[in-house]
Amino acid sequence: MEYKIKTGQGQTEVFLSGRMTFADHEKFRHVIAAFEGPLGHQMVFDLDGLDFVDSSGLGMFIIARDTALKRNLEFKIRGARDDVKRLITVAKFHKMFDIED
Amino acid sequence: MLIMAQQPRRRIATDGVSGEVLKRLLTGTRLDAAGETADAGVLVMADMTSDRLALALERPFRGYVEFRADDDMLADRIETADGRGDFCLTLTTPTAFSAVDTARVVCDALEHRGALPRARRSTVEMALHETVANAILHGNLGIDDDLAADVAYYEAFVDQLRRLLEQPEAHRRWIAITAWWSDRELQISVDDEGAGYEPPSQFSLSDEDQASGRGLAIVHALADEVSITKGGRCTALRFAHER
């Protein structure tokens, strides 16, 4: 997994790319460290560049959401496609998250 | 007069392996290290990475075994890889964790061999990946992923994972992926060397807000049949080609 973080007015976008798997927990810790901002600041995971995600990766989405909640930030996911979108559906994660196309 | 038939010696191919070390490890067996050769059943490979293994998997070997200089079970691993299934890959836990994208390269190999139709690739790769992840994390590393589910313990989980991977025990535990196929179906089994577990009677993807424990439920949702044997140390998947 690779990631880029872009912070702007009112929101921080995290662009995830490649394959997000059980081998990425260490790297994901750095993503979580970027969860900062004033009350209501929005953290956005952009999955458009992500080719593959596994159940550990889905678990990281929950960690991200709960971290945002703990720090009074908003959290949403956008741009899932192909296999990533399919796994989110199979795992019923679309019922738990605010996910935009 | 009793005539004892001598079993023929079997040639194995090698890649990046020290000849002297290999010779020592194979002393007293009927295996011959032949170096670069196409007529062997098994390739023994050092320094496995996704790229190196992907190239090797395009060659027509039946079995692929990771080489470790301290592996005194190497001959047994080679015999198993050569005699079991139509395809077999055996590698250590740290290699399967991060050096090799295991499910992807195995699916590439199966596609290359005509065993995995393009239309089924995505389903098989997702299910195999989850099965391999389960064998590594819960099998060989014995990690408790309840910690991964809670934001308060996530840092501790990541630290625990790193420590477990650094321990010598991780390098002494292997996983083996074996595949069999026909015109009608593909079967893949994943064996680990962990403590095993008692599988639940039912796997379900509930709507509960859980960060872990979904892997095998996803496998059950994707594969046509899943069987867990050897006390939880072997998970076998079956995929029918017709849908």
Image: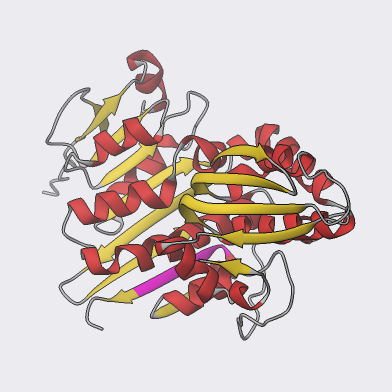
Q: Quick check: B89 left or right of B59?
A: right
Q: Position of residue B207 (x, y in %)?
A: 68, 81
In the picture, which quadrant includes the C terminus of chain B? Answer: bottom left
Residue at x-position 45% and y-position 69%: A86
Q: Position of residue B157 (x, y in %)?
A: 78, 48
The mark total stands at 0
Residue A35 is one of the magenta-drawn residues? no
Report the predominant secondary structure element of the magenta stretch.
strand
Residue range highlighted in magenta:
B233-238
Residue B237 is one of the magenta-drawn residues? yes
Along the line of sight, which residue is nearer the eye, B53 or B198?
B53
Along the line of sight, which residue is nearer the eye, B236 or B101?
B101
Q: Quick check: B143 left or right of A56?
A: right
Q: Is residue B4 above or below residue B27?
A: below
Q: Quick check: A13 left or right of A89?
A: right
Q: Quadrant of residue B225?
A: bottom left
Q: Is residue A79 above or below residue B164?
A: below
Residue at x-position 52% and y-position 26%: B70
